[in-house]
Amino acid sequence: MPGLVIVGAQWGDEGKGKVVDLIAEQADAVIRFQGGNNAGHTIVRDGETFKFHLIPSGILYPGKHCVIGNGVVVDPKVLIGEIDGLRKQGIDLTGLKVSANAHLIMPYHLLLDQAGEARLGKREIGTTKRGIGPAYADKASRLGIRVQDMLDEKILRQKIAAAMEPKAPLLREFVKDPSIDLHQMTEDYRAFGDRLAPYIADTPPIAWKALDAGRLVVLEGAQGALLDIDHGTYPFVTSSNTVAGAACGGAGIGPGSIDEVWGVAKAYSTRVGSGPFPTELHDAMGERIRDAGGEYGTTTGRPRRCGWLDLVALKYAVRINGLTGLVLTKLDVLTGIGPLPVATGYTGPEGARFESFPYHQSVLHRARGELVELAGWDEDISGARTVDDLPASARDYIDFIEDQLGIPVVTIGVGPGREQIIWTKAADGLRQIAA
Ligand code: GDP
Ligand code: IMO
Ligand code: MG
């Protein structure tokens, strides 16, 4: 002990990468436990920007154990690209390990993801088209190919053939695509296996050892609570459980090893892709927030949909994750906007009111945030380093969030840089254990 899970509390891109990087300094290991290269986690260090899709956000500390856990779906080509890119930047990768049991994203998964979206037309999910859904579907169907399979040509070929067979009708339109030729794929994935062999490992013991020694283990989530396959706005979700509970299965540890669960949330809301978004702004204010916050997807470059802070959805995220602390990011983006509306309820069809997150899809699609207005501030807060450095109305905004959610804010982000953060007293406990 202790284990700290850090998860997205909204629709992804909340700023998980930055806080994981910061806390990783004190950790023995950082473990990604779900998702794949649909994720894009940004760290800005000394003015240099790093974007990670598969590699855990602790990699900037030389020798730090950084684990891609069994719950992740791995596109080996993307992983090798990321490794090569970091090497060129002079980053030490000796601590990187990838679980032998993690499932692989195959070329046919990419094609099926694209074809599935095309088939849905206007009803598309707006996936990242990285093959995530089809790869997790194969895992659940027991037709998945795992990282360890890349090390044995015979097994690899057999498994690829077995996985392709039931997909033949769906892949018919791609028969001439060389990327899904059985021999080519076997050769390519064998070569990826050779490249990745030094990193492939039995990864849960890395976590067990650190936990047994009383060292901090950070479990890094991808996506966010409202994109969870069970608890999110299904079917407009990703294909894995993104909530904190998934950290155990995806890393190979038990719930008793988790001491703290931090949820990361922006001081407003964004979503990329389709689906319900009760506080979405379709006007100039939405564009203003998009510009001020640089709200364009890290993975796909798509403009993110922007809206006010949604405390109904956040309260739900507190419950489904068991959050013990809130990492509030991008407060600086709201500077100069006032008053600041936040949703504390929803209005649904026929004037129905909701104070908690409605489960019913038809309600959710038509729910609109019921807004209360809080005071804004005009002072530049990007240099604030303590809560007392913040203007009174910014402190009130944070107090209101804490009151509504019933959990403390542990950090406040006031800019993308590593140093642009305020640690509150609520974070002291964990920081002391970790030190
Ligand atoms: P993640 O997927 O949750 O790791 O988040 P992303 O990296 O996709 O998107 C978050 C973006 O916000 C990145 O560009 C970060 O550099 C940036 N960011 C993180 N925290 C802050 C903050 O407190 N203020 C501002 N202005 N930007 C931030
Ligand atoms: P990070 O970890 C924001 C969204 C996609 C789409 C839905 C399904 O950077 O926060 P998928 O490709 O997973 O099948 O797409 O999920 N999505 C994300 N949105 N941040 C992410 O990751 C996301 N990963 C997937 O836009 O709506
Ligand atoms: Mg992101």
Image (spheres, grey):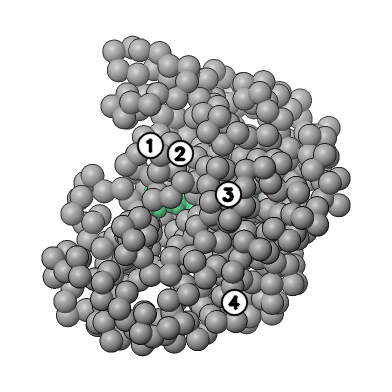
Q: Which mark is residue 199?
A: 4
Q: Is residue 398 left or right of residue 82?
A: right
Gap between marks 3 and 1 measured at Cα? 23 Å
User: Nearer the observer, disc 3 or disc 1?
Assistant: 3
Q: Specify which label sits upstream in the sequence, 2 or 1.
A: 2
Q: Which residue is located at x 34 percent, y 39 percent?
A: 234
Neighbour tally class for label 1: few under 14, some 14-19, many 20 plus, Cα within 10 Å: many
Gap between marks 1 and 4 measured at Cα? 36 Å
Q: Is residue 289 above or below residue 214?
A: above
Neighbour tally class for label 3: few under 14, some 14-19, many 20 plus, Cα within 10 Å: some
Q: Specify which label sits upstream in the sequence, 2 or 3.
A: 2
Whether residue 340 is visible, yes or no, is yes
What's the residue type where badge 4 is placed?
Tyr
Residue at label 2? 226
Q: Is residue 36 left or right of residue 8?
A: left
The answer to whether the residues at label 2 and label 3 have Cβ atoms under 8 Å apart is: no
What's the residue type where badge 2 is placed?
Leu
Gap between marks 2 and 1 measured at Cα? 6 Å
Whether residue 293 is visible, yes or no, is no
Q: Specify which label sits upstream in the sequence, 3 or 4.
A: 4
What's the residue type where badge 1 is placed?
Thr
Q: Specify which label sits upstream in the sequence, 3 or 1.
A: 1
Q: Which residue is located at x 35 percent, y 18 percent?
A: 348
Residue at label 3? 248
As helix, strand or loop, the secondary structure at mark 1 comes to loop
